Amino acid sequence: METHKNAMNSQKPDRIAIVIGDITKISADAIVNAANTSLLGGGGVDGAIHRAAGPDLLAACRKLHGCPTGEAKITPGFNLPARFVIHTVGPVWQGGQHREAELLTSCYRHSLELAVANHLETIAFPSISTGAYSFPVELVARLAVAEIRRFLASDQEITLVQLVCFDSYTYSIYQNELLPDS
């Protein structure tokens, strides 16, 4: 796994890192699951997290009774290296005229708020909604980085936010968003 770190600002360096790899292997207080509204597993990141966590994750998710788009819920991580899984439901891309940007930003904000509410210091995000939900990765990276920076500017509890990219293409887009002049 390749890891690259970029400073958010001169006061709090290394609070945001880009990682190329498999989110199910990330050791953090919490990883974020790009879930569907049922929270009962699916394809992509969601399916991989459910498989890696084991059947107890599905049982825990059943008790949550789903999750609306843009919101987040938390479960233990079970067989994952992460202690917790924060499940958030990203929007399906419909051309950008159906509150997609607002809902995606809400996914990041609610996930970070849930991490703080549970006294978690480290959190790892996938590139939410860029797989089967077809959200343009460039726009996701821009919105995600902006919301994470906004949140970290007023929060001191979270020490590290990792952006976990599945491939080098996605990594390069997030890298460009983290450059100091972006």
Image: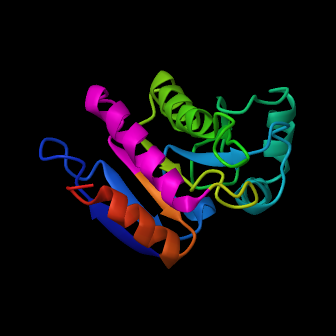
Q: Position of residue 7 (x, y in %)?
A: 22, 54
Name the residue at 51% across, 53% down. Answer: 139
The kind of secondary structure the magenta stretch mainly shows is helix
Residue 48 colored magenta? no
Span colored in magenta: 136-161
* Nearer to us in this view, 130 or 54: 130
33 to the left or right of 106:
right
Q: Position of residue 25 (x, y in %)?
A: 58, 64
Question: Residue placed farthest to the top in the image?
Answer: 117
**Image quadrant containing the C terminus:** bottom left
Residue 159 colored magenta? yes
Q: Position of residue 56 (x, y in %)?
A: 82, 44
**Where 59 sits versus 124, above or below?**
above
Name the residue at 37% across, 32% down. Answer: 151
Q: Is residue 27 visible?
A: no
* Nearer to us in this view, 166 or 84: 166
Q: How is the image coloured?
A: rainbow
Q: Is residue 121 visible?
A: yes
Question: Residue placed farthest to the left in the image?
Answer: 10
Name the residue at 33% across, 40% down. Answer: 149
77 to the left or right of 115:
right
* Nearer to us in this view, 127 or 114: 127
